[in-house]
Image (cartoon, coloured by chain):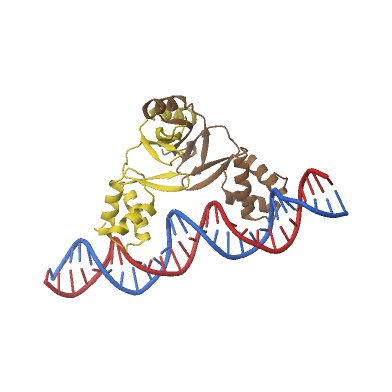
Chain colours: A yellow, B brown, C red, D blue
Amino acid sequence: MRYSQQRQLIREIVTRTNSHPTADWIFKQTKKIIPNISLGTVYRNLKQLEEKGEIDTIYDGNIVRYDWNVESHDHLKCTECGDLIDIHFKHDKFKSIVKRKFKFDANSVEMKIIGTCSKHAKK
Amino acid sequence: MRYSQQRQLIREIVTRTNSHPTADWIFKQTKKIIPNISLGTVYRNLKQLEEKGEIDTIYDGNIVRYDWNVESHDHLKCTECGDLIDIHFKHDKFKSIVKRKFKFDANSVEMKIIGTCSKHAKK
DNA sequence: ATAGTAAATAGTAATCATTCCTATTATTAT
DNA sequence: ATAATAATAGGAATGATTACTATTTACTAT
């Protein structure tokens, strides 16, 4: 994989935010630096970076978000503001349960807890 | 909400499968009975049935699947065959943890375990 | 440094799932 | 049976993503 300014910029933008950005948001950020960058370039590079294991993709409902944090972790999704908050749970127990009950070999576990975050708690 | 053949058929098709079908699959099934049914009708009715709480939507990666089982439950996703297998876990502990640690009021928990099912276990 | 190469890009067209629009049809209360 | 209006079929529109292609760029061997 050969160097490119575009890929390096995309990598930096994803690395520098905790907002789990979408491809379109990343595209808008890159345009501030490389005005004629194309959206296809953003998508192509995000896919390559994911394949290399440098970033992670998160399916948030039917939209795709990207995350520099490739360690297994879970998310809290606030229905009021849409924010995704990172949280880490141990999943070993679940993996062993499904192995025993279903002979299912678990590779990873994705957990999302939906509710309202502290900023938007209903009184 | 007024009766319609189309909606009744869609309801029956979703109810009679455990395959967590997509809108397109449901559309193909309905066409066998009502050949000139339109895809928009399928989507509109699936949405209405979900709003009434008769069915559930599942986001499987970036595609939407529908499920007659509206009770909270989790899924095992086989990376070999794509099948979704239903499983039920208790989530109370997670809800209380995020309440304590993040002041996050959890409504629901979605858990997906990714791996290989017994039919496709690697030797 | 230069030329040859293959990878990467910009720009645009195509695809896919889903939603929207509208004239027509079907259901239901009277 | 009729009027009111919910629901439909068919097709256009949308939005996210992928594919295509001519041009540009990065790397390699000279």
C22 vs B100, left or right, is right
D9 vs A13, left or right, is right
Q: How many numbered marks, from 0 up? A: 0
Tell me residue A96's x, y (percent): 42, 28
Relative depth, front residue between A119 and A94: A119
Tell me residue D3's x, y (percent): 80, 53
Relative depth, front residue between C18 and B114: C18
Q: Which image quarter is the N terminus of chain B in?
A: top right
Which residue is at the far front? A123
Tell me residue C7's x, y (percent): 28, 61
Measuring 43% from the left and 27% from the top, which residue is drawn there? B94
Measuring 57% from the left and 45% from the top, which residue is drawn there? B21
Q: Which image quarter is the C terminus of chain B in?
A: top left
Asked if residue C11 is positioned above or below residue B8 in the image, the reply reads below
A64 vs C5, left or right, is right
Measuring 49% from the left and 36% from the top, which residue is drawn there? B75
Asked if residue D28 is positioned above or below residue A12 in the image, the reply reads below
Relative depth, front residue between B117 and A11: A11
